[in-house]
Image: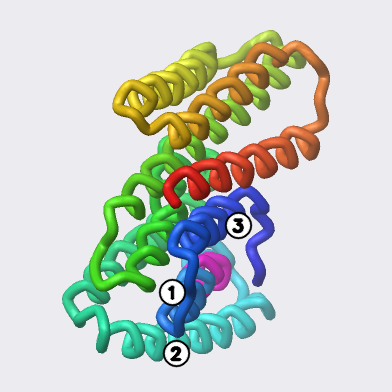
Amino acid sequence: MWPREHGAWSLLLTPLAAALLVAGRVNLLTGAVLGAALAIFLLREPLLVLARQHWVWREAKPESALARRWVAALGLLLAGLGVALASPWGLPLVALMAAGAAALTMVAVWTALRNRQRSVWFQTMSCGGLTFTAVAAARSVNEGFPAWGWVLWGLCWLQGVAGILVVHTRLDAMIARKTGRGEAGIGRAAWLAVGLLAVVAVGLAVTGSLWLAAAPAFAAVAHGWELGAMRLETKLTVVGLRAMALSMTYALIAALALR
């Protein structure tokens, strides 16, 4: 029942760790936020199994019983964590964040049920939801929502989307070499994302945030190199490891700058 998408785990946990690095402290609420983020993410897989049992499979599968137990356990955990967060944060805020997380989870299950989980649009939206842990972690150690939490979220989301588009471009290039057909639009979108990273870097530098500008500048160069090296044969596992290393380094640079 544990999701195997290493890139998704990175998108979930790296912004959270970066936010805590900026804050320089943790507390009990931080643990609650981490637990809730993990529980919501893990809930997708058993919910997908139950959805397949209901709409796809004609016979009862043994994994469905295990999925029900996981949903019950994670649901109870989320309810307890919600109560713990409602006292200091207020019920309206917790309810709003829970509703957003539930909506994204349902979309993820529906998309996977229809075998569209590789959709660029879905992955872009999911990236925004996963990297929102930066904002939640920042809120856990502050009385309100600090501006740097939103900045960190935006930077992590932008870099995550660029990484998604670059990987899709790599996959598209592999398909094109085998079949002679590909989607040129994916490559253009990836270069557009790289260009946006460069624009953000220039904008930050012009406004005096030179150290923070180093993060999108680094990502723009790294992703640009990856796009320029598309003709080189590279294993997807190597591409994935490079992407994770880039994401972590990027978040570290941004966190150190925001401190």
Residue occupying image coordinates x 50% and y 73%? 34
- Name the main secondary structure of what is drawn in magenta: helix
Q: Given the image, on which type of amino acid does mark 3 rest?
A: Trp
Q: Given the image, on which type of amino acid does mark 1 rest?
A: Val
Front label number (2 vs 3): 3
Mark 1 → mark 2, Cα distance in angstroms: 15 Å
Q: Quadrant of the N terminus?
A: bottom right
Q: Which residues are magenta?
A: 39-48
Q: Earlier in the sequence, mark 1 or mark 3?
A: 3
Question: Which sits in the foreground, 25 or 7?
Answer: 25
Residue 181 drawn above or below residue 27: above
Residue occupying image coordinates x 59% and y 18%? 224
| Residue with the mark numbered 1 | 33
Which numbered circle lies on residue 9?
3
Does 64 sit left or right of 100 as displayed?
right
Q: Given the image, on which type of amino acid does mark 2 rest?
A: Leu
The x, y position of residue 228, in whole percent, is 66, 12
